[in-house]
Image: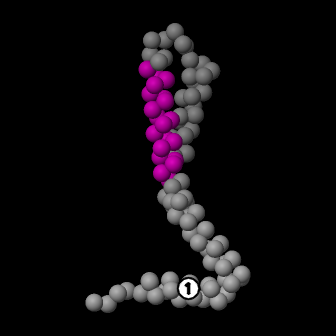
Amino acid sequence: MMRSNLERVNGELYLFLDDADRNDPAYIKNLVSLHKEVRDTLTTMVRFQEKAMGDNNQMIQADTVNILKVELAKESPDVWKRVRAKLLEEDEPIES
Protein backbone atom coordinates (compact mmCIF):
# COMPACT_ATOMS: atom_id res chain seq x y z
CA MET A 1 0.00 0.00 0.00
CA MET A 2 2.77 2.47 0.93
CA ARG A 3 4.76 1.66 -2.18
CA SER A 4 1.81 2.22 -4.51
CA ASN A 5 0.94 5.46 -2.74
CA LEU A 6 4.53 6.70 -3.05
CA GLU A 7 4.64 5.73 -6.73
CA ARG A 8 1.39 7.61 -7.35
CA VAL A 9 2.66 10.70 -5.50
CA ASN A 10 5.95 10.50 -7.38
CA GLY A 11 4.08 10.35 -10.71
CA GLU A 12 1.93 13.33 -9.79
CA LEU A 13 4.99 15.27 -8.70
CA TYR A 14 6.66 14.50 -12.03
CA LEU A 15 3.63 15.87 -13.87
CA PHE A 16 3.57 19.07 -11.85
CA LEU A 17 7.28 19.74 -12.15
CA ASP A 18 7.75 18.82 -15.80
CA ASP A 19 4.49 18.75 -17.74
CA ALA A 20 2.07 21.00 -15.90
CA ASP A 21 0.29 23.88 -17.54
CA ARG A 22 0.96 26.65 -15.04
CA ASN A 23 -1.71 28.79 -16.67
CA ASP A 24 -4.40 26.23 -15.84
CA PRO A 25 -6.75 27.62 -13.12
CA ALA A 26 -6.69 24.26 -11.33
CA TYR A 27 -2.88 24.24 -11.11
CA ILE A 28 -2.70 25.73 -7.59
CA LYS A 29 -5.59 23.59 -6.34
CA ASN A 30 -3.84 20.47 -7.66
CA LEU A 31 -0.54 21.52 -6.08
CA VAL A 32 -2.24 22.01 -2.72
CA SER A 33 -3.88 18.58 -3.01
CA LEU A 34 -0.53 17.01 -3.85
CA HIS A 35 1.07 18.80 -0.90
CA LYS A 36 -1.54 17.32 1.44
CA GLU A 37 -1.00 13.84 -0.01
CA VAL A 38 2.78 14.11 0.43
CA ARG A 39 2.33 15.35 4.01
CA ASP A 40 -0.06 12.51 4.86
CA THR A 41 2.25 9.94 3.28
CA LEU A 42 5.24 11.22 5.22
CA THR A 43 3.22 11.19 8.45
CA THR A 44 2.26 7.57 7.80
CA MET A 45 5.87 6.66 7.06
CA VAL A 46 7.03 8.23 10.32
CA ARG A 47 4.39 6.25 12.24
CA PHE A 48 5.54 3.01 10.62
CA GLN A 49 9.15 3.85 11.44
CA GLU A 50 8.30 4.63 15.07
CA LYS A 51 6.41 1.34 15.40
CA ALA A 52 9.28 -0.60 13.85
CA MET A 53 12.01 1.08 15.87
CA GLY A 54 10.15 1.79 19.07
CA ASP A 55 10.49 4.94 21.08
CA ASN A 56 13.96 6.40 20.48
CA ASN A 57 14.12 7.94 23.96
CA GLN A 58 13.51 4.58 25.61
CA MET A 59 16.11 2.93 23.37
CA ILE A 60 18.68 5.61 24.21
CA GLN A 61 17.97 5.28 27.93
CA ALA A 62 18.26 1.48 27.76
CA ASP A 63 21.54 1.74 25.84
CA THR A 64 22.88 4.23 28.38
CA VAL A 65 21.94 1.98 31.29
CA ASN A 66 23.55 -1.03 29.58
CA ILE A 67 26.78 0.87 28.94
CA LEU A 68 26.88 2.08 32.54
CA LYS A 69 26.19 -1.44 33.77
CA VAL A 70 29.02 -2.97 31.72
CA GLU A 71 31.52 -0.27 32.62
CA LEU A 72 30.66 -0.36 36.31
CA ALA A 73 30.96 -4.16 36.35
CA LYS A 74 34.41 -3.90 34.74
CA GLU A 75 35.76 -1.04 36.81
CA SER A 76 34.30 -1.89 40.19
CA PRO A 77 32.73 -5.36 40.42
CA ASP A 78 32.02 -5.02 44.15
CA VAL A 79 30.14 -1.76 43.72
CA TRP A 80 28.21 -3.26 40.79
CA LYS A 81 27.18 -6.25 42.94
CA ARG A 82 25.82 -3.94 45.65
CA VAL A 83 23.98 -1.72 43.13
CA ARG A 84 22.57 -4.75 41.33
CA ALA A 85 21.37 -6.32 44.57
CA LYS A 86 19.69 -3.05 45.56
CA LEU A 87 18.00 -2.76 42.16
CA LEU A 88 16.73 -6.34 42.36
CA GLU A 89 15.33 -5.66 45.83
CA GLU A 90 13.39 -2.66 44.49
CA ASP A 91 11.95 -4.75 41.63
CA GLU A 92 10.44 -7.32 43.99
CA PRO A 93 6.70 -6.85 44.59
CA ILE A 94 5.74 -5.38 47.93
CA GLU A 95 3.54 -7.71 49.95
CA SER A 96 0.82 -6.21 52.12
* Crowd rating for badge 1 (residues with CA inside 10 Å; few <14, some 14–19, many 20+): some
Quarter-of-image position of residue 81: bottom right
16 in relation to 72, above or below? above
**Residue 42 seen by the camera:** yes
**Residue 54 magenta:** no
**Residue 31: within the magenta?**
yes
The residue most toward the left is 96
x then y, percent, for residue 84:
56, 85
Task: Look at label 1 and name its amino acid.
Answer: Arg
Magenta residues, start to end: 29-48
* For residue 23, above or below residue 48: above
Q: Is residue 1 visible?
A: no
| For residue 70, side relative to residue 36 (left or right) | right
Nearest to the observer: residue 27 or residue 11: 27
Image point 46% across, 88% down: which residue?
Answer: 89
Q: Residue furthest top?
A: 23
At 43% from the left edge and 20% from the top edge, which residue is drawn? Answer: 29
Residue 96 position, x and y percent, is 28, 90
Q: What element carries label 1?
A: helix
Magenta-drawn stretch, dominant element (helix, strand or loop): helix
Against 49, residue 41 (above or below) is above
Q: Mark 1 points at which residue?
A: 84
Q: Position of residue 49 (x, y in %)?
A: 53, 54
User: What scheme was used to colour the molecule?
Assistant: one colour
Q: Residue at x 54, y 13 (%)?
A: 22
Residue 78, quarter of picture:
bottom right
Relative to 3, residue 79 above or below: below
Q: Is residue 80 left or right of residue 46?
A: right
